[in-house]
Amino acid sequence: MLLLKSILFVLLLVLPNAVPAELDWWQNAVFYQIYPRSFKDSNNDGTGDLRGIIQKLDHLVDTGVTALWLSPIYSSPQVDFGYDISDFRDVDPLFGNMSDFLELLAKAKGKGLRVILDFVPNHSSDKHEWFEKSENSVPGYEDYYVWKDGDPSVPPNSWTSYFHGPAWTWSTKRNQWYFHQFASAQPDLNYRNPKVVQEMKDVLTYWLDLGVDGFRVDIITALFEDVNYPDGPLDQSAYRSDQPETYDMVYQWRILLDEYQKKNGGDTRVMMTESYADADKLFGYYGNATHNGAHFSFNFWFITQLNKDSTATDIKGVIDKWFNNMPERYTANWVLGNHDQSRVASRYGTGRVDGLSMIEMILPGVAVTYNGEEIGMENGKVTWSEGWDPQGCNGNEEDWEKNSRDFQRTPYQWDATVNAGFNEGHKTWLPVSDKYTTLNLALQHTKNLKSHYRIYQELVKLRQTETLKFGKLRTFALPNNVLVIIRELENNPTYVVVVNVGDKFASVDLKSVASQFVVQIPSVQSSKIPKSIIDGSTIYLVGFEAVVLVSV
């Protein structure tokens, strides 16, 4: 038996009560990422679409999420699944049309859901009108992209694309090289051209005028490069990531959002940025002493710094590191997965799904969920011949499985009918997981069945309590690989998450917190009964068991 108060004072993180008058709508929100291709196919062409999302809005309402965030839906040749945009102001026919989007927007808002769009500012498609004009040296567009002179057989420097091969492509039309951090079909925009800066601000304003509630800014770190484009070592990040001008651009976009709200009224239009930078660079995207930046920059540390071998001490370390580095005026956020990362159940192991959901949902701040994580979806099986992702397919077959992101993008598993209820047709753009008959939403809706979905749903509901919105945070990592997270607020119930991170039996003594607890939410492997009362001095946990407790 491990007595909590006597052994872990050296590992304790305590965040003080800091109770604002109220939270802005986004500060305790659950953002639900929808990957449109894989969510719901309404017309049986094999690819998910906007009308499919409309059909499933009630799922989001039932789940209790605050906002849906749509991965790119813009007009695109689809070289990189919509991240190669040929028109920033229109919807790709693959997903529907602008009328479908406006209907989705209206119906989502009518159901109390906010709508967030992906904003992809770093590059466009090479089929975009701007690039076609720039490549042909049309006056006014010459410098919309990054062009360099040079020998047609030798790129301007040694930089490589994230999708393999050189980061430069020779244009026979312009007789110059153009720069692309990603595919050659995704030329980088030149933000040192004021015209480009204004064009992209106009794109933001266009979608704000239509009624969106904010933006997730894609790969913000890549926006600028060292102006000299020097040859560099294998790690070129010092020259092509997190440049000083990038932060200023984020601050300009924040000014645009804030001024839009002042002019047009309504609630905060939120901006969240994607960056895998280290802490010293990451928090710059939040702002500085004189400027506000993103409302929050994604915290990917549960992805980049933890895995299935991580211990309770490791998890606590990631939580503590975030709060120790984040300035107090900012809002924390927690991201367990997305369309670029292996699914939570596959990355950490299926036994840890509920425990990780409990950790994410009880911590202060924003929670971000990738579609399917609420039911514990696992990576699907995709063969080399079935793959689409350029990050994998542009390499060789031997490295494809390591590099491809197709596995976490397989269709959502709605039920046990044909194609997991994704559609009623004979094909899907990626194969449906072969586990869909036993791992699907409909099954997890079954009355009296303990399921990942039911647990997730209850956790989201719990976030509306005063304690979880405003309460003090304490974290403990016990020597027997048990993580304890406590949220407490004066004159309100205390909530405790206890997670056995390991596969061995463990026991915990929490009588220093409360003599008795009510079992609020037990994980799927737990034998504890919801609403039952247990003794705080003797809490037993089987391997990977997790439970949310509330003080009596």
Image (tube, grey):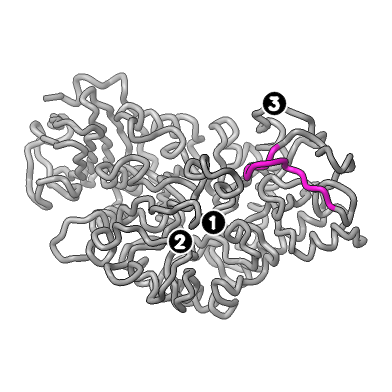
Q: Does residue 483 appear left or right of residue 226 in this picture? A: left
Q: Nearer the viewer, mark 3 or mark 2?
A: 2
Instruction: Determine which of the numbered discs, if any, sits on residue 503 in the image.
Output: none
Which badge, 3 or 1, comes first in the chain's sequence? 3
Please name which of the two marks, 3 or 1, marks the residue nearer to the observer. Answer: 1
**Label 3 vs 2, first from the N-terminus:** 3
Numbered label attached to residue 430:
2
At label 1, counting other C-alpha atoms closer than 10 Å, the crowd grade (few under 14, some 14-19, many 20 or more) is many
Q: Which element type, helix, strand or loop, lies under badge 1? A: loop
Q: Nearer the viewer, residue 504 or 538?
A: 504
Discs 2, 1 touching: Cβ within 8 Å:
yes
Magenta-drawn segment: 160-171
Question: Contact (CB < 8 A) between labels 3 and 1?
Answer: no
The residue furthest right is 139
Q: Which quarter of the image is occupied by the C terminus?
A: top left
Res. 388 mark: 1
Name the secondary structure under disc 3. Answer: loop
Which residue appears at 23% of the width and 58% of the height?
A: 454
Which sits earlier in the primary sequence, circle 2 or circle 1?
1
Looking at the rendered structure, the secondary structure element under dot 2 is: loop
